[in-house]
Amino acid sequence: MYLLTLNNMKKTLLLSALGAIAFSCSQPAEAPAENHEGHDHNHESMAPEEMDEATGRVFFANLENGDTVSNPVYVEFGVEGMEVRPAGEIVEGTGHHHLLIGNAFLAKGEVVPADSVNIHYGGGQTSDTVTLPMGEVRLGMQFANGVHASYGRDMSASIKVFVK
């Protein structure tokens, strides 16, 4: 009888341990602390209601809709009503530029992807020289907060240029 009770206790302990492991595996892990030393990192999108209101506008300071340009193309970013600040932390009334090649703007709160057609200027740059594909190209300028979350259509500008 003692042997039977010992076996039942072992089974109970084993089942309890397996249940605890299964429960802990089903819980979400804590997110690691973010590293803001560089600006080449991913962030979740922010809900628009969590974002500061953008009060201003952005514009292409040296290009106009319909311009004919040659590579390399110098692009100068303009902003009014907001302060340009490097990426890394969210500070109300500030942000930085992004050049969107082939796209007009991103929805408010959407994080700007970092790739060959979504160029980040997280160092606070206000101009760049880029090589564009030949033909008609849509250029979008998107202003975003310190973690690259778009301020939306209100803080974007879009033009089409012809690259010869």
Image: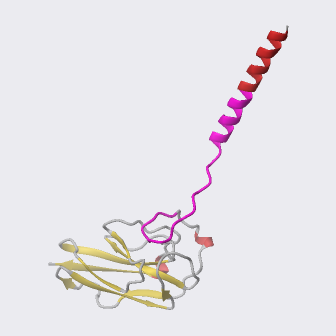
Q: Position of residue 18 (x, y in %)?
A: 68, 30
Task: Give residue 6's quadrant in the image.
Answer: top right
Image quadrant holding the N terminus, namely top right
**Can you say whether 15 is above or below 151 in the image?**
above
Q: Is 78 situated left or right of 130 in this image?
A: right
**Residue most toward the left?**
164
66 left or right of 60?
left
Number of labels in the image equals 0
Q: Position of residue 35 (x, y in %)?
A: 51, 67
Q: Is residue 100 magenta?
A: no
| 146 or 5: nearer the viewer | 5
- Residue in front for this viewpoint, 26 or 33: 33
**Is the residue 20 above or below the residue 45 in the image?**
above
Is residue 33 covered in magenta? yes
Depth check: give the residue in front, 96 or 109: 96
x and y, in percent, of residue 108 in the image:
52, 72
Residue at x-position 29% and y-position 88%? 64
Can you say whether 129 is above or below 80 in the image?
A: above
Q: In this view, does 80 lie to the left or right of 135?
A: right
Q: Residue at x 22, y 82 (%)?
A: 73
Residue 56: x and y in percent read: 50, 88
Q: Give the range drawn in magenta.
A: 15-43
Q: How is the image coloured?
A: secondary structure
- In this rendering, the answer to whether 158 lies above or below 39 is below
Q: What residue is shown at x 17% (from left), y 72% (from top)?
A: 134
The residue lying at 58 percent from left, 83 percent from top is 92
Look at the image and tell me in which quarter the C terminus lies: bottom left
> Which residue is at the far top?
1
